[in-house]
């Protein structure tokens, strides 16, 4: 951290900053220029975090030069991590497909959607039992009975599943059944929820807040890591922009930016970003080309009757294309697809970190 003093600062003002920093265990290096004095702070950044240095007399600016996040930073761990979800994995060597219905509606719909997901190459299933909806009048999800449906379908198919948890009160229930917990865009800065999901020790899928900067998103991951749980996968799901033709704007540049900052895997959600079925495969192509470690895709057997997000769900005829597209683009990016590593349903023994 660097403190820049105004040209009006006296020796007494400079000393005041130095004393405050040394009092919390830091060290200062003072560099006096003709017009300005710069004070370099050395030590653990968290030591200085509580100091209101901006408010000290004649302080012009306080500039952070090291990263605010530590545990998820690739300074802490230069090798990219691989997160294991049952027998499936998400990491830098492969491209993983997660797919399933946006929401669990009925046992039949969930089973059909999850079979579509498996046929499309998914090695992890998805489905929402607790739905965070913008409108209180919209379908809110089946809750615990939806979780049971998904659990049974996933067990029968032999794949692990990820599902969203929207409130700290439900974390224990969801963690008992799910293989991976999702924190959605609307909850990215629900710090209590981040801590609770972290404490379960289960893998966590952390979606980017729709108006969050990359740093805010990575700091949210740091909250989870701070509980001792480093099984975190980041998911870019589109950010809110001025463009109304798409539901959100997929920020593909976030993928290499995040990979340059952290050791965490990063996947993209082509369904909630574009919000349109016709954009799902093009966005998947762009994501794999830019280095994404996986994709999470909505599929539905009958999207016209879907209770949530039908327009963005892939349908039966798209399923072979999903599988082929991911395989072809993964090969071009020198990666294998997770299903090629044998993580599919034939290895059902590996299913179910969840009970
Ligand atoms: C979802 O994945 O079902 C979902 C609600 O996503 P997001 O939080 O990205 O809107
Ligand atoms: Mn959705």
Image (cartoon, grey):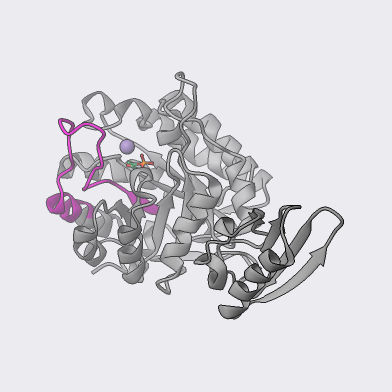
Q: Which quadrant, please, contains the N terminus?
A: bottom right
The reply to whether residue 159 is visible in this rendering is: no
Q: Residue furthest top?
A: 245
Q: Quadrant of residue 195?
A: bottom left
- Nearer to me, 349 or 39: 39
Query: Residue 171: percent from the left, percent from the top?
Result: 24, 62
Q: Residue at x 63, y 53 (%)?
A: 335
- Nearer to me, 240 or 350: 240
Which quadrant of the picture is home to ligand 2? top left
Q: Quadrant of residue 24?
A: bottom right
Query: Residue 49: percent from the left, percent from the top?
Result: 53, 66
Q: Main secondary structure of the magenta part?
A: loop
Q: Which residues are magenta?
A: 124-150
Q: Residue at x 24, y 43 (%)?
A: 131
Q: Quadrant of residue 228?
A: bottom left
- Nearer to me, 48 or 20: 20
Query: Residue 267: percent from the left, percent from the top?
Result: 51, 49
Q: Indicate left or right for 290 with 122 as reference.
A: right
């Amino acid at each position: 951290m660097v403190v820049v003093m105004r040209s009006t600062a006296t020796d007494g003002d400079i000393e005041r900053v130095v004393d405050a920093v040394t009092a919390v265990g830091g060290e200062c290096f003072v560099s006096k220029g003709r017009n300005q004095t710069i004070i370099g702070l050395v030590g653990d950044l968290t030591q200085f975090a509580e100091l209101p240095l901006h408010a000290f007399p004649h302080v012009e600016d306080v500039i952070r030069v090291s990263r605010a996040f530590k545990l998820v930073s690739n300074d802490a761990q230069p090798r990219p991590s691989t997160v294991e979800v049952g027998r499936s994995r998400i990491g830098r060597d492969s491209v993983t497909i997660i797919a399933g219905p946006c929401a669990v509606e009925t046992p039949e719909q969930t089973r059909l959607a999850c079979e579509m997901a498996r046929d499309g190459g998914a090695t992890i299933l998805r489905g929402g039992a607790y739905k965070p909806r913008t409108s209180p009048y919209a379908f809110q999800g089946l809750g615990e009975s939806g979780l049971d449906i998904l659990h049974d379908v996933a067990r029968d198919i032999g794949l692990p599943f990820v599902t969203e948890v929207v409130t700290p009160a439900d974390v224990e229930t969801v963690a008992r059944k799910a293989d991976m917990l999702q924190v959605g865009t609307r909850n990215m800065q629900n710090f209590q929820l981040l801590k609770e999901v972290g404490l379960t020790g289960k893998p966590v899928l952390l979606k980017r807040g729709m108006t969050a900067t990359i740093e805010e998103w990575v700091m949210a991951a740091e909250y989870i890591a701070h509980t001792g749980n480093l099984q975190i996968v980041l998911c870019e799901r589109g950010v809110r922009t001025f463009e109304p033709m798409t539901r959100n704007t997929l920020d593909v540049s976030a993928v290499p930016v995040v990979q340059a900052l952290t050791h965490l895997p990063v996947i993209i959600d082509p369904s909630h970003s574009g919000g349109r079925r016709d954009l799902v495969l093009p966005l998947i192509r762009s994501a794999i080309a830019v280095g994404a470690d996986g994709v999470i895709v909505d599929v539905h057997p009958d999207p016209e009757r879907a209770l949530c997000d039908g327009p963005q769900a892939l349908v039966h005829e798209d399923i072979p294309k999903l599988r082929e597209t991911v395989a072809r683009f993964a090969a071009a990016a020198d990666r294998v697809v997770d299903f090629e590593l044998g993580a599919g349903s034939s290895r059902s023994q590996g299913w179910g970190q969840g009970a």
